[in-house]
Image (cartoon, grey):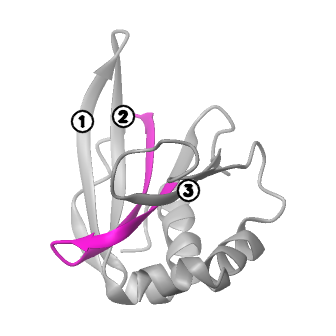
Amino acid sequence: MIKAAVENLDLLKRIERILKGRKNLMFYDGRKDGLEENIAFKYFYSSPKNALDFINIDIYEKPIDFIYGSISIIMDYDDIYKECSCDYGKIEAEKTNIRGVEKVRLSLLLNRYGFENIEDAIIFFEGYITNKTLI
């Protein structure tokens, strides 16, 4: 299913429609750009919350443990973000330290529903990092 969606460009067009106008938007083709083995493609753009934080969208060539891809960001640490589940998948929050500054890596691990409704999953994730009260 994923290969078919990628090959017929339907999924790419749907994602590009929702990301139109995002700052610093970049696209990487996993095969052409030499990304990690299972990443079919990646989008990378500035967060609507803070232009210095970047959101990554990775779509996998083949699902891994029923995870079809991920939407993630590394941003300033805030104890409000917690691991939880939503309709689109599981949100993981991992505290990290970058150059002596506390950060948090938030990832929405896309389940099949999140993958099939990628536009809604992106809007949800951006709202979650901005609003923190959606869940």
Residue drawn where x is 63% and y is 85% of the image: 8
In the foreground, 86 or 39: 39
What residue is disc 3 on? 130
Q: Are marks 2 and 1 in contact (CB under 8 Å)?
A: yes
In the foreground, 43 or 78: 43
Question: Is residue 58 magenta-colored?
Answer: yes
Q: CA distance from mark 3 to mark 2?
A: 13 Å
Label 2 residue SS: loop
In the foreground, 30 or 109: 30
Q: Residues within 10 Å of mark 2 (few under 14, many from 20)?
A: some
Question: What is the span of residues highlighted in magenta in the rendered image?
Answer: 57-76
Q: Which mark sits nearer the N-terminus, 2 or 1?
A: 2
Residue drawn where x is 36% and y is 50% of the image: 106
Q: Are marks 1 and 3 in contact (CB under 8 Å)?
A: no
What residue is disc 2 on? 77
Q: Tell me: 119 left or right of 71.
A: right
Query: Farthest residue toward the front?
Result: 32
What residue is disc 1 on? 95
Quarter holding the C terminus is bottom left
Q: Amino acid at mark 3?
A: Thr
